């Protein structure tokens, strides 16, 4: 009990330091005209396949790159590199989330002005990432149909801190008896009016709707960047 106030103080200082660095990162991204999208989900929700398909689809029209966070191994980065997009792995060890300092270090040597989109795949976790700003412009929270309809009710903080909810593996919905309307109601009860996209990265269903969601953001970002020059 005696140590609790000290732990709270340390945590507050860590988050404050992260927020300051994230603010600087966001300014760097804005100055470079790059749109930064972070992806958060629990393990096995299909983040990596979703990102792999996204990189492959956008690379014909846009300059894309990705940072991939994981506790160990570089398997995801190697997989995403098959899209020919620049990809870097951030291995966190025992840390269950990405932090702004990790993103900053991973960007060393990259000219951000050479990119239109930068994707940041967080460690598979729906708890810790909700507290850490990475300087992103858009945060996605992914949940798969295999995880159940009440995921937003169990992890409300991440849904409240995200901009878009993506329901993945929609091709398996019938097989696992997933109730889409119940899931949408769960999201709505936690975050009223939240933009929801239903996709299957495997079959391609819903992916075009996702790409169309991104394009207006990049057009607007380019206009803002040009006006600032």
Image (tube, helix red, strand yellow):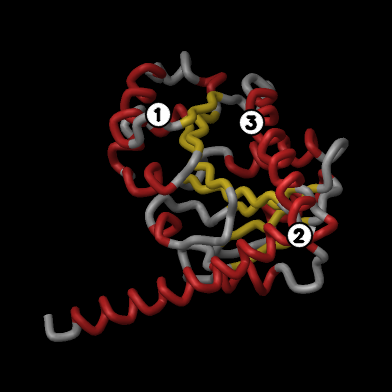
Crowding at mark 3 (Cα within 10 Å: few <14, some 14-19, many 20+): some
Q: Position of residue 78 (x, y in %)?
A: 76, 54
User: SS of the residue at dot 1?
Assistant: loop
**Residue at label 2?**
32
Mark 1 and mark 3: Cα distance apart in space: 16 Å
Q: Nearer the viewer, mark 3 or mark 2?
A: 2
Residue located at (69% from left, 69% from top): 106
Contact between marks 1 and 3 (CB within 8 A): the answer is no
User: SS of the residue at dot 2?
Assistant: helix
Residue located at (60% from left, 70% from top): 24
Q: Is 7 on the left-hand or right-hand side of 23?
A: left
**Residue at label 3?**
213
Camera-side residue of 188 and 121: 188
Mark 1 and mark 2: Cα distance apart in space: 31 Å
Residue located at (24% from left, 84% from top): 6
Mark 3 and mark 2: Cα distance apart in space: 21 Å
Residue located at (78% from left, 61% from top): 112
Marked residue nearer the N-terminal end (1 or 3): 1
């Amino acid at each position: 009990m005696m140590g609790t106030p000290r732990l709270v103080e340390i945590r507050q200082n860590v988050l404050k330091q992260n927020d300051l660095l994230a603010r600087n990162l966001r300014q760097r991204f804005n100055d470079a005209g790059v749109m930064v999208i972070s992806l958060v989900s629990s393990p096995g929700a299909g983040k990596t396949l979703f990102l792999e398909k996204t990189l492959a689809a956008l690379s014909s029209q846009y300059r894309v790159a990705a940072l991939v966070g994981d506790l160990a191994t570089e398997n995801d980065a190697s997989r995403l590199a098959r899209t020919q997009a620049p990809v870097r792995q951030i291995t966190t060890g025992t840390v269950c989330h990405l932090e702004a300092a990790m993103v900053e270090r991973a960007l060393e040597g990259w000219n951000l002005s050479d990119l239109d989109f930068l994707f940041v795949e967080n460690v598979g976790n729906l708890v810790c990432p909700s507290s850490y700003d990475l300087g992103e412009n858009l945060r996605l929270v992914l949940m798969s149909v295999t995880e159940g309809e009440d995921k937003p009710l169990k992890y409300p903080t991440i849904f409240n801190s995200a901009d878009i909810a993506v329901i993945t593996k929609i091709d398996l919905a019938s097989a696992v008896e997933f109730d889409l309307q119940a899931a949408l109601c769960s999201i709505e009860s936690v975050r009223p009016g939240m933009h929801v996209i239903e996709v299957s990265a495997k079959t391609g269903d819903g992916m075009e709707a996702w790409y169309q969601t991104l394009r207006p953001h990049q057009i607007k970002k380019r206009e803002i960047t040009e006006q600032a020059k």
